[in-house]
Image (cartoon, rainbow, N blue to C red):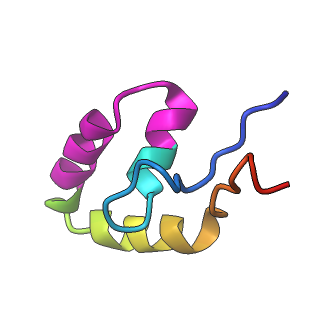
Amino acid sequence: MSKKLVRSSKNKMICGVCGGFGEYFNIDATIIRLIWAIFCFSGSGIIAYIIAAIIMPEEKDTWDD
C-alpha cells in the first residue's frame, strides 16, 4: 500500500494540513506545526498553508467503505 499525502481528519487543528504532513513523514504533528509557525514569520507560510489546504485531498475514513 502506497502512502498518500492527505489532510488528516483525526489530527487537525484548522484544516489538517500539519497533521497530514506529520502522518506522512511519521513525525509528531506538533513539530510540524512549530516548523510551520516559524515559516509563517517569513511571510509566505500563510499562503503556503492555504494552498496546501486547497490542494491536499481530505483523508477518507477507513471504516466508511
Q: Residue furthest front?
A: 63
> Magenta region's main secondary structure?
helix
Residue 51: x and y, percent? 50, 72
Q: Which residues are magenta?
A: 21-39
Residue 38: x and y, percent? 16, 49
Left or right side of 63 for 22: left
Left or right side of 25 for 59: right
- Observer-nearest of 59 and 34: 59
Residue 47: x and y, percent? 37, 73
| Quadrant that contains the N terminus | top right
Look at 51% across and 29% down and name the residue there.
Answer: 25
Quadrant position of residue 24: top right
* Picture mark count: 0
Quadrant position of residue 2: top right
| Quadrant that contains the C terminus | bottom right
Left or right side of 42 for 22: right
Look at 42% across and 74% down and name the residue there.
Answer: 50
Specify whether residue 25 is painted magenta: yes
Look at 51% across and 64% down and name the residue there.
Answer: 52
Specify whether residue 60 is painted magenta: no
- Observer-nearest of 1 and 47: 1
Left or right side of 60 for 51: left
